[in-house]
Image (cartoon, rainbow, N blue to C red):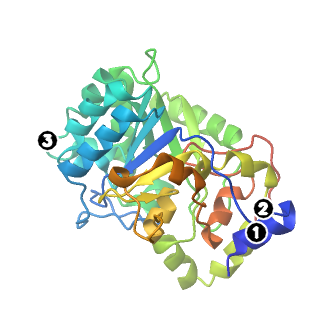
Amino acid sequence: MNNFSNVLEDITGDRALRREDLTTLQVNLGNLCNQSCRHCHIKASPLGRRIMQRNTIDDIIAFLCFNKVKTLDITGGAPELNPYFDYFVKSARNLVAELIVRSNLTVFFEPGKSYLPEFFKNYKIHLICSLPCYTQKNVDSQRGEGVFKKSIKALKLLNETGFSKDNGLLLDLVYNPGGAYLPSRQDKLENDYKENLYKNYGINFNRLVTITNVAINRFKEQLKANNEYEKYLKVLEDNFNPENIQRLMCRYFLSVDFKGYLYDCDFNLALGLFLKGIGGEPLALNNLDRLQFAKTGIITGKHCLACVAGCGSSCQGALTAECADKNDI
């Protein structure tokens, strides 16, 4: 049962979402990562074998040459571990107004990756970096022992390089809950982060991005193991906020997987819910008809409740500033 469509229809009288003009292309370079986070929706790890190849990256670059897209958003896994990462950034940077790289920070300390802070500075990359809490205990419990200390060291390096201080060098951090509950208000959490990180470590950053955990893959397995899956879905459903519908990222956004296939978002990508052409074939950038695409429906499921609940959730953070939540499990 598609809880999302049912609730959407109950509240708005319509089961469908409508596409708007494409503003953001998010590219998932694969599931190779130096971490194995317990909430990771694509099950990334050092054993990841889904790695985007050069020919697919060239298809993306060609698409950007002929299609106006404001933002290129590069993610993974740890996208920096893709062997063609540098080539992709260098080739794409002048084709978009904004180039985002989603980094786990600890990748800077992998062999041969110490150049990354300067590389990001030279290409004026907007960094969005994972730091699910400002305490060591909570970060290490989610992302692995020793991750917090490495993350703090990496953030200091980025500050020294000019991020969050120099004009055009944006450094944002990502918070996601450590369990089966909604994030607190983004502005309040941001103030807490800034106060604690500066007071304890002298670290500055621009903005906090809060993302609601989506109940798929590893997080879904964790919920089921704790008998919390159905309860968590009920929390999301009870907090369905229609104010978020107009701002949902799937309306302005396309996600590309390591083979070049297209999805409404990175969560649909993780579930294999690819967009289909007229004949039912998977849509890819090299066979995308923009007029045809504008008419394709957005694929939804019960996992979509996470994006609409409470203050809303997207890869750029909360969708609504003011929201009340009922977080009881």
Specify the label residue 35 is tagged with: none
Q: Is residue 210 above or below residue 98?
A: below
Q: Nearer the viewer, residue 270 or 155?
A: 270
Q: Residue at x 44, y 63 (%)?
A: 269
Q: Which callout, 1 or 3, points at the residue further toward the start of the chain? A: 3
Q: Quadrant of residue 34?
A: bottom left
Residue 240: assigned label:
2
Horizontally, residue 25 falls left or right of residue 146, namely right
The answer to whether residue 221 shows anywhere in this view is: yes
Give the residue number, with chain letter if any, for mark 1.
237
Q: Is residue 247 left or right of residue 193?
A: right
Q: Could you tell whether 179 is left or right of 130 in the image?
A: right
Secondary structure beneath disc 1?
A: helix
What's the amino acid at mark 1?
Glu
Discs 1, 3 touching: Cβ within 8 Å: no
Q: Earlier in the sequence, mark 3 or mark 2?
A: 3
Q: Is residue 71 above or below residue 40?
A: above
Q: Is residue 82 visible?
A: no
The x, y position of residue 48, in whole percent, is 25, 65
Residue type highlighted by circle 2: Phe
User: Looking at the picture, how far across and down is residue 101, in whole percent?
Assistant: 38, 39
